[in-house]
């Protein structure tokens, strides 16, 4: 390799390559941030669903649709069967309900897009929290005011530890009713 070729590689190609890689990394980092920490993540769902209408205006308890939230680890997303308990009668002529009814008639599950996600390396049990009186809003936000569900809290180790170490700062009305949560690694990393 001639000296002029080496000079060209070191003075032009290498800096350009490093610049392109750095810009690609930064763009990817910022564009994927909502997916990583979730805050602000608000995907379109296969059927538009308003938590504001159902949980807010109509005051339907979260446990009616998220049937296992107080019984097990997962809250579960509702099946079309649960939706159709009401919508075989109520507002069945609305476009979104017609879409829902078609899923139900075809016996196809709705492919809801998950909004709140923990890393696969973390263990979380909804029932432990719900059965201790910790309302869904502390982690999921005030969904009763959301037409379109979105993630409003970070689901990171730091956010969980912050609440476990000082639950009354986030939930003052539960002072004396809720103790500090566990902080040892095995509580969440199993």
Image (cartoon, helix red, strand yellow):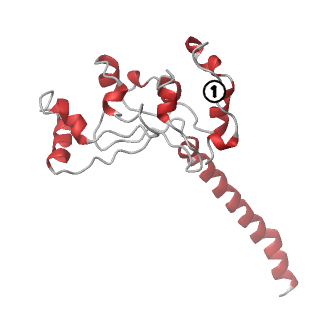
- 179 sits left or right of 98 in the view: right
Place residue 17 in its image quadrant: bottom right
**Residue that numbered label 1 is attached to:** 163
Q: Judge by depth and name the residue closer to the eye, 2 or 34.
A: 34
- Residue 153 appears at what percent x and percent y? 55, 31
- Residue 110 appears at what percent x and percent y? 28, 46
Q: How many marks?
A: 1
The residue at 47%/25% (across/down) is 131
In the picture shown, does residue 119 fall above or below 67?
below
Q: Residues within 10 Å of mark 1 (few under 14, many from 20)?
A: some
Q: Judge by depth and name the residue closer to the eye, 95 or 7.
A: 95
> In terms of secondary structure, where does tag 1 sit?
helix
- Residue 97 appears at what percent x and percent y? 19, 36
In the picture shown, does residue 136 fall above or below 98?
above
- 25 sits left or right of 132 in the view: right
The residue at 67%/22% (across/down) is 166
Q: Residue furthest bottom?
A: 1
Q: Judge by depth and name the residue closer to the eye, 186 or 76.
A: 186
The residue at 82%/69% (across/down) is 11
Q: Judge by depth and name the residue closer to the eye, 79 or 183.
A: 183
Place residue 164 in its image quadrant: top right
């Amino acid at each position: 390799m001639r000296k002029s070729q080496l000079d060209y590689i070191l003075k032009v190609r290498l800096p350009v390559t490093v610049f392109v890689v750095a810009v690609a990394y930064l763009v990817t980092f910022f564009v994927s941030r909502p997916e990583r920490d979730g805050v602000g993540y608000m995907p379109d769902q296969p059927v538009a669903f308003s938590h504001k209408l159902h949980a807010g205006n109509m005051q339907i308890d979260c446990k009616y649709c998220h049937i296992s939230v107080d019984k097990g680890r997962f809250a579960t997303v509702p099946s079309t069967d649960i939706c159709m308990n009401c919508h075989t009668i109520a507002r069945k002529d609305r476009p979104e309900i017609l879409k829902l009814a078609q899923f139900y008639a075809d016996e196809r599950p709705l492919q809801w897009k998950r909004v709140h996600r923990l890393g696969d390396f973390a263990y979380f049990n909804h029932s432990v929290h719900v059965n201790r009186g910790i309302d869904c809003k502390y982690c999921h936000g005030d969904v009763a005011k959301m037409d379109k569900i979105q993630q409003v809290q970070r689901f990171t180790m730091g956010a969980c530890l912050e609440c476990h170490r000082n639950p009354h700062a986030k939930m003052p009305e539960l002072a004396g009713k809720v103790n500090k949560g566990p902080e040892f690694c095995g509580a969440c990393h199993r």
